[in-house]
Amino acid sequence: MDSIRELEEGSRFAPDFEKRGGLLPCVVQEVQGGEVLMLAYVNRAAVELSISSGYASFYSTSRKALWTKGESSGNRLEIKNILVDCDQDALLYQVELEGAGACHTLNEADMPRHSCFYRELDPTAAEPKLRHGNP
């Protein structure tokens, strides 16, 4: 990029993959209702695949591999919008969930949880403690 102003105000999509060693954080938000479903990481290949396929792909930091959400579970994330933050080092995928849930963990009914953010910090506990919020 030629300037900070062009980076922050321009129309050129130029994600800064080099800033964090090739990976960018990617927040995944349900387009209808705005609920945050998950946080994942993307590399250049994941973003390119997401754009070309229309479905959310990510880079697994544990498996060190590209993956598309829903390949095995059927719980796919259809991309409706991709937003980039001001300095182009984080992305937001606004998606429509196709399937039972976005999380790989299961609730009490043995179904995928809708969101990976299903626990919350209990502010009344003497020691930091998590409690289940949404299923």
Image (cartoon, helix red, strand yellow):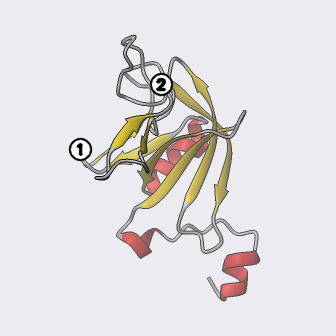
**Front residue of this view, candidates 61 and 44:** 61
Type of amino acid at the residue the image marks with label 2: Pro
- Whether 75 is drawn above or below 16: the answer is above
Q: Nearer the viewer, mark 1 or mark 2?
A: 2
Residue 78 relative to residue 40: left or right: right
Residue 34 relative to residue 73: left or right: right
**Front residue of this view, candidates 26 and 3:** 26
- The residue at the point 65 percent across, 65 percent down is 13
SS at mark 2 in the image: loop
Residue ranking furthest to the bottom = 3
Whichever of labels 1 and 2 marks the residue nearer the N terminus, that label is 1
Q: Position of residue 38 (x, y in %)?
A: 48, 42
**Front residue of this view, candidates 133 and 14:** 133
SS at mark 1 in the image: loop
| Residue holding disc 1 | 63
Residue ranking furthest to the left = 63
Q: Quadrant of residue 103?
A: top left
Type of amino acid at the residue the image marks with label 1: Arg
- Whether 123 is drawn above or below 30: the answer is below
**Front residue of this view, candidates 60 and 128:** 128
Q: Please give the count of numbered marks on the rendered protein.
A: 2
**Rendered image: mark on residue 90:** none
Q: Position of residue 79 (x, y in %)?
A: 63, 38
The Cα–Cα distance between marks 1 and 2, rounded to whole angstroms, is 27 Å
Q: Circles 1 and 2: CB distance less than 8 Å?
A: no
- The residue at the point 28 percent across, 52 percent down is 127
| Residue holding disc 2 | 135
Q: Residues within 10 Å of mark 1 (few under 14, many from 20)?
A: few
Instruction: For the N terminus, give its image quadrant.
Output: bottom right
